[in-house]
């Protein structure tokens, strides 16, 4: 655990020094929150939707973020072209929002099996659904209700470990306590706030922040740094908040004031 904490410190300091851009193809509901969270942590944001711009971003940035929350017809071309280009030029983080809902979402997520991300970040239901879709687990879990989880984080542990091994990267499963794994090491990160479940975009923006860290760190460290940042900043924000709106503001403040040591000191255990 000491080595992991040191790597987290290095990752956060590297973001502070290099201000890495992590461009996004992300949903229309939470796009501003994603950009603000990326800026608050010390990164830079650039949102694109067109196929040629997705490819251009892969050539320009070390990591990009793909979130399938709100699909429109152009995504049918943008997402495959971008993930194919990312395979050769950049690493990408996937948030498989509402996996299992609709034909295009299923088709795009299926396509990504051949051009896998380095980090998959989702709630338990989304992780279970992608693992099933890719044929990595059996079973009937991974029920879709929309964008929110219907399963517990622990239920998704095996799915997350299989997915991480398959992609040769890391999987972060969010919930009351978060699980981050690279298929060999699995860590539970604690903290956060129940307010996160009552604002939109906490999960989406966590994926965007993971993409910022992925520009400077390996997938496991990047996923854990983002997860810890949310757990520490979320806990601090809750102590100041008067409701959901002020929680969101306090959270961005807390995120922007985090130190490398804060992220490393987050309550975690290897499981
Ligand atoms: N009950 C909870 N208590 C504390 N933190 C939570 C809780 N539920 C979710 N979070 C935090 O909210 C963030 C987003 O996770 P989650 O709500 O699971 O994602 P999504 O919005 O994609 O479903 C994560 O940082 C997670 O740790
Ligand atoms: C509400 C909603 N609908 C489509 S995408 C989206 C945002 C989901 O954000 P998060 O998963 O971070 O809560
Ligand atoms: Mg989500």
Image (tube, rainbow, N blue to C red):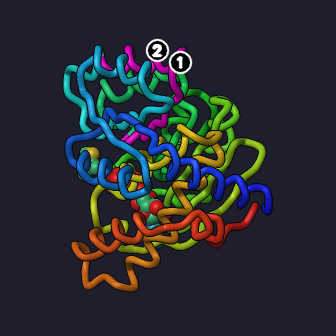
Which is more toward the observer, 127 or 18? 18
Q: Residue furthest front?
A: 17
Which segment is the magenta one?
Answer: 78-98
Q: How much space separates mark 2 and mark 1, taking CA atoms?
A: 5 Å
Q: Is residue 131 left or right of residue 35?
A: right
Residue 79 can be seen in this image:
yes
Would you name the residue on which mark 2 appears? 84
Quadrant location of the N terminus in the rendered image = bottom right
Q: Is residue 230 left or right of residue 153?
A: left
Up the image or down, 7 lies above or below 50; here it is below
Q: Is residue 96 magenta?
A: yes
Q: Which mark is residue 142?
A: none
Quadrant location of the C terminus in the rendered image = bottom right
| Residue depicted at 43% across the width and 74% down the height | 193
| Residue depicted at 26% across the width and 29% down the height | 48
Callouts 2 and 1 close, C-beta under 8 Å: yes
């Amino acid at each position: 655990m000491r080595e992991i904490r040191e790597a987290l410190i290095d990752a956060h300091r590297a973001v502070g020094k290099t201000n890495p851009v992590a461009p996004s193809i992300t949903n229309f509901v939470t796009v501003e929150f994603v950009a603000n969270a990326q800026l608050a942590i010390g990164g830079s944001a650039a949102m694109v939707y067109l196929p040629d711009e997705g490819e251009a971003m892969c050539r320009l940035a070390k990591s990009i973020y793909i979130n399938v929350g709100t699909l429109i017809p152009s995504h049918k071309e943008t997402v495959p072209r971008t993930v194919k280009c990312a395979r050769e030029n950049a690493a990408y983080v996937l948030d498989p929002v509402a996996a299992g809902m609709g034909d295009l979402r299923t088709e795009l997520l299926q396509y990504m099996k051949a051009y896998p991300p380095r980090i998959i970040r989702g709630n338990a239901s989304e992780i279970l659904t992608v693992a099933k879709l890719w044929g990595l687990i059996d079973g009937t879990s991974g029920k879709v209700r929309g964008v929110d989880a219907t399963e517990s984080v622990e239920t998704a542990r095996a799915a997350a470990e299989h997915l991480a091994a398959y992609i040769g990267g890391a999987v972060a499963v969010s919930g009351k306590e978060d699980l981050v794994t690279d298929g060999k090491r699995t860590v539970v990160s604690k903290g956060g706030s129940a307010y996160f479940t009552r604002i939109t975009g906490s999960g989406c923006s966590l994926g965007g922040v993971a993409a910022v860290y992925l520009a400077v760190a390996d997938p496991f460290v990047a996923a854990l740094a983002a997860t810890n940042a949310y757990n520490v900043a979320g806990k601090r924000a809750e102590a100041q908040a008067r409701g959901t709106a002020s929680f969101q503001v306090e959270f961005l403040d807390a995120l922007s004031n985090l130190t490398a040591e804060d992220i490393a000191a987050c309550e975690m255990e290897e499981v």
